[in-house]
Image (cartoon, grey):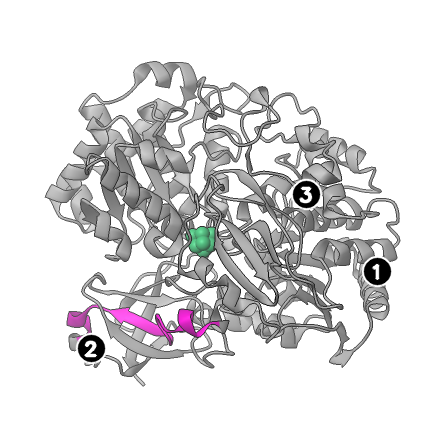
Amino acid sequence: MTHTTQTTCPYCGVGCGVVATREGDKITVSGDKTHPSNYGRLCSKGAALAETLSLDGRLLQPEIRGQQTDWETALNTTASALNDIIEKYGRSAIGFYVSGQLLTEDYYVANKLMKGYIGTANIDSNSRLCMASSVAGHKRAFGSDTVPVDYSDLEQADLVVIVGSNMAWCHPVLFQRLSAARQQHNDKLKIVVIDPRRTATCDIADLHLPIKTGSDVILFNGLLHHLRAHDHLDYRFIEQSTQGFASALQIAKETAGSIPTIAQACDIPENDLIEFYRLFARTEKVVTLYSQGVNQSSSGTDKVNSIINCHLATGRIGRVGMGPFSITGQPNAMGGREVGALANQLAAHLEFEPEYQAIVQNYWQSPTIAPQAGLKAVDMFEAIQQGDIKAIWIMATNPIVSLPDANKIKTALANCELVIVSDCVRNNDTVPYAHILLPAQTWGEKDGTVTNSERRISRQRAFLTAPVEAKPDWWIISQIAQRMGYRHGFNYQSPADIFREYAGLSGVENNGRRDFDISIFSQLTDETYQTFTPYQWAPRSTLQLASDTHHRPRFFAEGRFYTPSGKANFIPVRPIAPKSDTSTSYPFILNTGRIRDQWHTMTRTGKTPRLLSHLSEPFVEIHPDDAQAFNIKENELVCLDSGLQQQIIVRAKFSEGQKRGYLFAPMHWNEQFSAQARVGTLIAPHTDPYSGQPEFKHTPVALYPY
Ligand code: SF4
């Protein structure tokens, strides 16, 4: 007998729909042709999902200090250990580090426990490493964290500017859609890639600008000035729908300078710069898509606003085929933003303001409410190191590989009084540091919702029988909350219960200053939750309970934003150099990122030989001329050293696409696969002052033969 289940891929923020088909013991996974984000397409990772379902490497039993135990004991011990820490050191001695791999329902319950019951906002997500600068940039410009572009806009644009994104590898299905649109439009659609590296994404580009890392603000300030100088501004839109234009333009003019100055500052040919400015100026339908190359920077928020400024100045927002478009890295980074499971958000797009704190506490009927924003990811682990946080609960993430200064994370966890890890895998580098291990269900076993980069909420559905001791994250959190003494806020029977409550919270009155409202789902029945079809959330004023439609109302279509005045803010931005510069000791700039066939720290994708065969070992890419100058042979082992505690050893690969003076190393390898290739150990914990996002794209390093 054949049984099919519609669910979504657990990897990137494209959020593709997939169909899992079970025939006897055999399971296959294919693209869901009815899902409006991918229409049946899959990339190599999605297509290999069925090969990752074995129980190898799974965490299958609760453990306390290395001893297997039963759930009752594990839950009671965790609850009383957390209560003991609170009693001894206070609420702010607790931290939760959560993940864009969690489902929205898991996120919601974790956030509620922390902010409404424990009473601190020391909960942050690994999404801090991914898109926090975009969130901060959106809020500064729009007064809300609103993504105003859909995937279909890429297909309807006449110019797509891709900044700091190798979407061919990191968001492959979106890249497939863009490539198909380009073919269909007979090359009328122009594509510009702005990236220090010549990546696979450049294969479909008309123009590639290999800018210096950190020069994005100069480039876009220069564009703003160019648009003004050549009369390409939309003064009506500027006047009616924005504020702060004059000062943003003034700063842009002062800081960018002439074309030769900008070209020199960005280290790109003048003619290419002029061509980019001309293309942008003369094309009405422009989407500027950006990702980690913009966000992962000590000035990421300013970079985001320099892009948004150009769209506001031309009125190219809120209409078909145009707008600034931040794409998220993780499958449910957006769900975490919606829930508010970030240290500087309260809940459901409500901020830390007394009025909203009262609203949320009243809605939750909770004993307390977090009084102010909490510690962001890098600061949270620093607080563990300093002994200010005594207990950390890490859910579905592997900070020993993924956070900056990753060896310091080891030391911090080794010295922490209580480390709780709930995860589906045992082969996670963080697991050995846990005092309490709680086995969670994984993809294919758990039920809930996720939101992708175009604000589309989809269901993840179980199609496997979970191992008997693996539990849903929301259940684990709720059980511990109840055992901590919070009996009334966590009596959920299913993820549908949580989704209804969360949807209701999104609709509470807030003087119209919030973009996010899915309260139409607050009365959803269990049956409708089961059959939930992908739903893209739209402006609050246009709520409708509808299955997906291509004609949903757009954000900002009427030129109204979520600021108190209703006008979008231009943000004057000055270029700021990356925190560290190269020197004779550290002459290369290391850029880090993803490769095509691996995901995060490889705990799932590393299971399939097919995916491992693409790039089977950790490496560093170097321009052949740099290699020659530094006496590096192709394929030899080399050391990378940034002056932090540990060097890494990887294989040298030559690439003409690498900018001179730059290196690229993938972020994926954990210690299970390669003992000395954790790139995170090289990255200094410099962060953006607004978003707290670390600077992963610019680390001065030394390189020498091993
Ligand atoms: Fe999964 Fe992303 Fe590939 Fe789609 S593009 S199949 S969501 S990894």
Residue at 35 percent across and 78 percent down: it is: 650
Q: Which amino acid does label 2 sit on?
A: Phe
Q: Name the residue under label 3.
A: 530
Mark 3 lies on a secondary structure that is helix
Q: Position of residue 323 (x, y in %)?
A: 37, 31
Closest to the camera, between mark 3 and mark 1, is 3
For marks 2 and 3, the one nearer the N-term is 3
Q: Name the residue under label 1.
A: 83
Magenta-colored stretch includes residue 622? yes
Tag 2: Cα neighbours inside 10 Å, few (<14), some, or many (≥20)? few
Q: Mark 2 points at which residue?
A: 630
Q: Where is residue 47 in the image (x, y as percent from the top left)?
A: 44, 59
Q: In this view, does 441 lie above or below 134?
A: below
For marks 1 and 2, the one nearer the N-term is 1
Between 421 and 93, the one lying in front of the other is: 421
Q: Is residue 368 above or below residue 412?
A: above
Residue at 67 percent across and 25 percent down: it is: 510
Closest to the camera, between mark 2 and mark 3, is 3
Q: In this view, does 457 lie above or below 679?
A: above
Mark 1 lies on a secondary structure that is helix
Tag 1: Cα neighbours inside 10 Å, few (<14), some, or many (≥20)? some
Q: Is residue 532 left or right of residue 652?
A: right
Residue at 81 percent across and 75 percent down: it is: 69
Quadrant of the snapshot with the C terminus: bottom left
Q: In this view, does 21 lie to the left or right of 675?
A: right
Do we see residue 440 in this rendering?
Answer: yes
Q: Residue 613 carries which label?
A: none
Between 226 and 311, the one lying in front of the other is: 311
How far apart marks 3 and 1 lie (CA) works out to: 36 Å
Between 164 and 641, the one lying in front of the other is: 164
Magenta-colored stretch includes residue 317? no
